[in-house]
């Protein structure tokens, strides 16, 4: 039997045998339960088959329509940032033993992958100031929702108090998770760009499992963790802090400020923004909560000959087999992206992280000053900020329209806060990383001033 395309595993004979096995005569029989009146008839409006050369050309043309960070100067953050990525990272993660690795269930053949995850956990413990960290959280937003679920299970309480300065998408995921677990989510407003402590004090009760804050928060402002900590611990709840790991080059680690659970997204640590993901979340806890953590923990041990080795430890079989009894259903593996973060941190070192964080801080503050002086915009929030800040546009100016004008000039503008905060219509969230030069910042500020 000759085949048109030998690399396609499904032959006509395969198709006939499968139809015979399930008792169908033709492919059409598989769709007979769908009423004919609503089924599409005819040929879908798409091109004919393309050869390899034409297909590559077509896909490159489609990709070229994206406003990516290679061809445009980005001042957009809001959770994904245009940071410098050392070239060594791509060299390491392109090795087949890393990019093909999945969940390392068999330690005897997975020592390299297990060691990579162990080192990622060790770095996260240093950054967060916590006792134990895990691996394989999908991203920072789902890690935050998992933290709320863990707090409820640990305290046996059903209320989660979360600040509106937490990333809007992370709050949405917390609400979604809460519905499945029967949790009540109470949102707290903000004042001056940070969590309103008076509202927080009134909301926290003996039914509160956790208070969840983000610092630097979605507006880029630094929260006063030392003021929030006693409010939640006085009622025996848990303090969950979502953090930007890049900012830890300058700020005190949340674990040293009294946090019980620290989560975040490792994207700033050598992971490309990639037009939206994937990224890698991290999750760290105080030691009493260690056995309740989702994901997996890699531990260091010795084999029978006394040589150092690595294994999965404290694994609950329910997570993989009896899933209805699991504390969490996360069991995928983000180890390749965790490896990006580990290589980034090892390459940069403590001095490099400090320098990068300081560049983010200084350039963001220079940009805020330049935008305020050249464009007629103002900074509505007086709170200290890291590398992201809110800009109030002149009355009548539209952030969406301004962004279209900026894009035409080669800039990816800031996030339109009116999209998720109706009260902040006419406000833009601007991010400045170490990659932005003084000339780029000045050009952006000038062009923004011209457009408004």
Image (tube, helix red, strand yellow):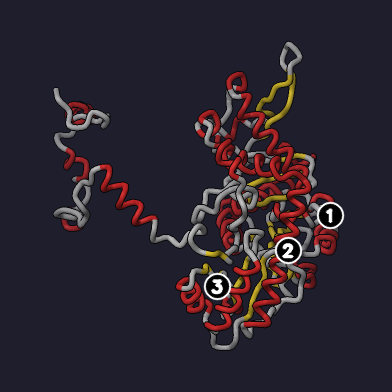
Mark 1 vs mark 3, CA separation in Å: 32 Å
Which part of the image, by quadrant, shows the N terminus?
A: top left
Answer whether labels 1 and 3 touch (C-beta < 8 Å): no
Q: Residues within 10 Å of mark 2 (few under 14, many from 20)?
A: many
Q: Which quadrant would the C terminus be assigned to in this image?
A: bottom right
Quadrant position of residue 24 = top left
- Look at the picture and state if 356 lies above or below 404: above
- Quadrant assignment, res 202: bottom right
Q: Which residue is mark 3?
A: 416
Graded by Cα atoms within 10 Å as few (under 14), some (14 to 19) or many (20 or more), the crowding at tag 1 reads some
Looking at the image, is mark 1 or mark 3 nearer the viewer? 3
Q: What numbered label is drawn on residue 361?
A: 2
x, y percentage for residue 90?
Answer: 55, 41
Q: Residue at x 58, y 26 (%)?
A: 105
Q: Please state which of the two labelled residues, at mark 2 or mark 1, is closer to the viewer.
A: 2
Per the image, the residue denoted by label 1 is: 257
Which comes sooner in the sequence, label 1 or label 3?
Answer: 1
* Residue 116 place in picture, x, y as percent: 65, 33
Rounded to the nearest angstrom, the CA distance separating label 2 from label 1 is: 21 Å
Specify which label sits upstream in the sequence, 2 or 3: 2
Residue in the picture at 70% in, 76% down: 369
Mark whose residue sits in front, 2 or 3 = 2
The residue at the far front in this view is 439
């Amino acid at each position: 039997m000759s085949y048109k395309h030998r690399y396609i595993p499904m032959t006509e004979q395969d198709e006939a045998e499968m139809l015979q096995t399930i008792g169908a005569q033709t492919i059409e029989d598989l769709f007979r339960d769908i009423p004919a009146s609503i089924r599409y008839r005819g040929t879908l409006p798409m091109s004919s088959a393309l050869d390899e050369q034409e297909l590559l050309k077509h896909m490159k043309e489609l990709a070229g329509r994206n406003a990516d960070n290679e061809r445009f100067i980005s001042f957009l953050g809001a959770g994904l940032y245009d940071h410098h990525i050392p070239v060594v990272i791509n060299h390491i993660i392109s090795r087949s033993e890393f990019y093909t690795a999945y969940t390392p269930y068999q330690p005897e053949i997975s020592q390299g992958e297990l060691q990579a995850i162990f080192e990622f956990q060790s770095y996260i413990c240093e950054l967060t100031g916590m006792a134990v960290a895990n691996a394989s959280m999908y991203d920072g937003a789902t890690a935050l929702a998992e933290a709320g679920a863990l707090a409820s299970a640990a305290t046996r309480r059903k209320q989660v108090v979360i600040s509106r300065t937490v990333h809007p998408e992370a709050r949405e995921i917390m609400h979604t998770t809460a519905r499945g677990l029967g949790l009540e989510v109470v949102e707290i407003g903000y004042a001056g760009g940070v969590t309103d402590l008076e509202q927080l004090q009134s909301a926290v009760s003996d039914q509160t499992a956790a208070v969840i804050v983000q610092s630097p928060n979605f507006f880029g402002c630094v929260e006063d963790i030392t003021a929030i900590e006693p409010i939640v611990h006085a009622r025996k709840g848990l303090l969950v802090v979502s953090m930007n790991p890049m900012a830890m080059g300058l700020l005190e680690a949340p674990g040293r400020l009294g946090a019980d659970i620290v989560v975040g997204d490792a994207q700033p640590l050598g992971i490309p923004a990639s037009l939206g993901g994937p990224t890698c979340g991290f999750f760290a806890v105080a030691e009493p909560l260690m056995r309740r953590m989702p994901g997996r923990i890699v531990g260091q041990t010795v084999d029978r000959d006394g040589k150092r080795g690595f294994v999965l430890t404290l694994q609950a079989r329910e997570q993989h087999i009896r899933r209805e009894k699991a504390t969490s259903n996360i069991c995928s593996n983000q180890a390749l992206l965790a490896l990006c973060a580990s290589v980034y941190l090892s390459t940069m070192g403590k001095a490099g992280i400090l320098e990068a964080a300081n560049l983010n801080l200084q350039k963001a503050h220079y940009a805020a000053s330049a935008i305020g002086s050249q464009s007629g915009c103002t900074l509505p929030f007086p709170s200290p900020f890291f590398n992201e800040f809110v800009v109030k546009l002149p009355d009548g100016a539209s952030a969406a329209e301004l962004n279209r004008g900026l894009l035409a000039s080669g800039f990816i503008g800031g996030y339109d806060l009116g999209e998720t905060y109706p009260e902040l219509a006419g406000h833009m969230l601007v991010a400045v990383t170490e990659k932005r030069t003084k000339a780029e910042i000045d050009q952006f500020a000038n062009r923004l001033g011209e457009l408004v």
